[in-house]
Image: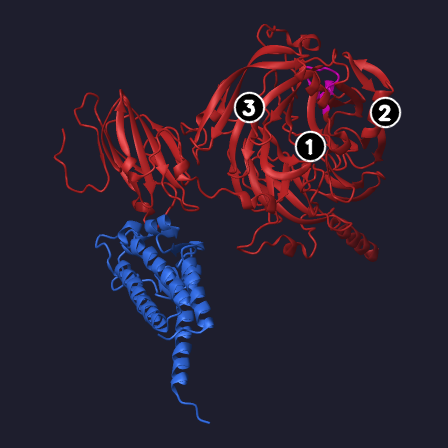
Amino acid sequence: MKKIHNYSAIAVAIAALCFLATFKFPFWVIYLTAPQYPEGLTLYIWLHKVSGDVEIINGLNHYIGMAIIDETQFPEFDILPYAIGFMVGAGLLIAFLRKKKLLFFYTIFLVLFSILAIYDFWHWEYQYGHNLDPDAAIQVPGMSYQPPLIGFKQLLNFGAYSFPHGGGFFYISGVVICCIASILEWRRGKKQLTPKIR
Amino acid sequence: MKNLTLMLLVTMLTIAGCKPKTGTSVASGDAASKVYVAPGTYDEFYNFVSGGFSGQLAVYGIPSGRLFREIPVFSEDPETGWGYTEETKPMLMTSHGYVPWDDFHHPALSTTNGVHDGRWAFGNANNTPRIARIDLKTFRTAEIIEIPNSSGNHSSPFITENTEYTIAGTRFSLPPDYEGANTDVSISSYKDNFKGYLSFISVGKETGNMDVAFQIQIPPLNTDLARGGKGPSHDWFFFSCYNSEKAFTLLEVNASQKDKDFILAVNWKKAEEYAKAGKGQHQKVKYTHNTYDEKTHSATSEIKTDVLVLDPKELKDVLYLIPCPKSPHGCDVDPTGQYIVGSGKLAALIPVFSFEKIQKAIANNDFEAEYDGIPVLKYESCLHGEVQKPGLGPLHTEFDDQGNAYTSFFVSSEIVKWNVKSLQVLDRVPTYYSIGHLCVPGGPTAKPWGKYVIAYNKITKDRYLPTGPELTQSAQLYSIEGDKMKLLLDFPTTGEPHYAEAIPASLVQPNSTKIFKIEENNHPYAAKGEKEAKVFREGNIVHVVMTSIRSHFVPDNIEGVKMGDVVYFHVTNLEQDWDVPHGFVVKGANNAEMLIMPGETQTLKWEPDRVGVFPFYCTDFCSALHQEMQGYIRVSPAGSSVPLTFSTGKTAAEPPAK
């Protein structure tokens, strides 16, 4: 089996460390501002928990009938640490074994996992935004409160910003590094197959 | 002849137009921009202004003069429930029982090494002698201690350089009131039976907790104002006094006879040593010490019974008298701690004493007489010099960071700026009208912040739109940045301000409490979640352990209370969000409403006076559904069989109980 270049091995190792860093920093942040909240309200989403002004946001959300944000409702928080742990282990192993095929599989796995994670995040946002209590005090016909996947969206008096945070940036960096390494390895492989013209 | 008549007419008209100008508008052109604090931006200084007969402490912004808050201290405040809730009632307990009012004259902001540290404000109760400590994190009164053997607590609560002590003096001397003392004496026996006391109240270095450490018994002088020494004079405290005549009637005349009264120089460090060595007399007295616990959200009032009294006639090196012209009021120490300024309110000069000279005079036994066994130093030996013809009726002096002093003059209604070393008058500005105290930010400290002088006037007259016979009180802000003082702003004040202090916002603002943490709430009747809400009976007492959060109470339907019951509503505000207080009140409540801050529990006592259904509601507009934040409590006749029930959100009708 073909071995990967030294640089690629280092790159994968770095990517693995990036994944490791996601344990230490929040993955995503949802930031809310309103006329009466100039100081803003922040919701941090980690691999295994949510933090920030969760109680206050829950308190406010009951007016429009949004469900309570409750960590125990998310099986993801149980799964994600293992999934990321696996990515760290696998990445380091590939960097050590330097098998090209494994790198390709790894990268494909990362990309598919990321797409699934984005879909999952969007799905929860959709759930929270649309699954409203019919007895809620404030009911605006046709209004839903799905926060943006990424970027800004106005939800009644609240402006909602949604962006990756420290952990998210590490994760994205890890995936991008692996993608670049794979592409370079792919091209290097192709070059080696092409007979030299001289 | 015709010409002459015309000339006469013109002259008369001119004279008529020459009516002296009052100070209606003497602010200079750029004054507005100097006091303009744009919407959403902050003032540079907090100004803590005593409320006088309001008993409270008002907080203003400088330079805007905007009122932020009135902190309830010595007087009940039905708006917040201070003195009405079960938790705050003990704060106003005294040896005379519950006292709902007092007269707050002087704030003192805590200092470390003579410089503002932004931790606490102290305040005096003049009528029923007490000192309060206000926490500048919560802007709430944290502690109130009563002073035994005392009355007319005016020369108070000034502090020593590191806030080791806050002090209390007796403006009204009295027969001592310790157990066994003869208090039932003829008023005309004043000279023999009346005494004054200087009390030193220690302040816990970290906690701020106050304790009457010792008292110095003095002759029956009326001690008026005071200041602690700084730097070289760190160990000393200086008090002004009037009535060295020992008058007990018509003081206006009888206490103004002598050419000179005194400044009392107290070596508190020596007194402290004597106190620690037990060289005093323990007297059995009765006074209260009230503390508010931020974790239980409740106050406790404790009776104390012991005080240590030192006699300066025996302990010779504790107290000296310095003659000072004509009933001095202000007694102020400059930032270097080297000069002490006496302000004889009937004098036409300002004497400035030198700490160094006072020490030399003491060392040389340079005494001119004894007064009731206390050595009187020679005036000239202590004098640095006199400010000549400064104005009429000097009251109080503060300092800037350039070696200048600013003295208020009640009679001539002006502020006079003069140089402490050279004693030269540099500038004067009129005040409208009859200034009492004045305030330079950091003016009494070792590090004045300068920039402004604020006048707290005693007479308002035509300065504002009239409001009947009782007018607003008036403060005035002057710039002292240039050589000339410039009037910038008039602003109305609450109560009747006496003294005030100003401190840079940067020393206070970052520490301001936003919420109380619900998990740290140790109130015995706290409900830290809606599941903990309950109603239960103990004999004829019904405890309603209630929660409030936007925008409902749990419970909000209560039945089974009977005539003759006493109901305690213990309301916990479950919010953990900034600026979301809830209020609570019930129809017919004979006391007040209460405001409950996020994470706090407060209790309102209610004794229903009739059978019926009574609404209760949130009084602090908390949310879009604030109007819906309400509930009902049903009161049945005594002996009724209606069971005690409570609920929130239960809509199914229960079978009606009869």
Chain given the colour blue:
A
Say the numbered circle drawn on residue B360.
2
Identify the colour scheme used: by chain
Q: Is residue B73 visible?
A: no
Q: Which residue sits furthest bottom?
A: A198
Q: State the CA–CA distance, disc 3 to disc 2.
A: 37 Å
Residue occupied by mark 3: B145
Q: Is residue B348 above or below residue A102?
A: above
Q: Do the CB atoms of the residues marked 3 and 2 lie less than 8 Å apart?
A: no
Q: Nearer the viewer, residue B630 or B120?
A: B120
Residue type at mark 1 is Glu
Residue located 21% across and 55% down the image = A134
Residue type at mark 2 is Lys
Circle 2: element type: helix
Which mark is first along the chain, 1 or 2? 1
Circle 1: element type: loop
Q: State the CA–CA distance, disc 2 to disc 1.
A: 22 Å
Residue extent of the magenta highlight: B240-255
Chain bearing tag 3 is B
- Quadrant in the picture for residue B570: top left
Q: Nearer the viewer, residue A167 or B484?
A: A167
Q: Nearer the viewer, residue B151 or B189?
A: B151
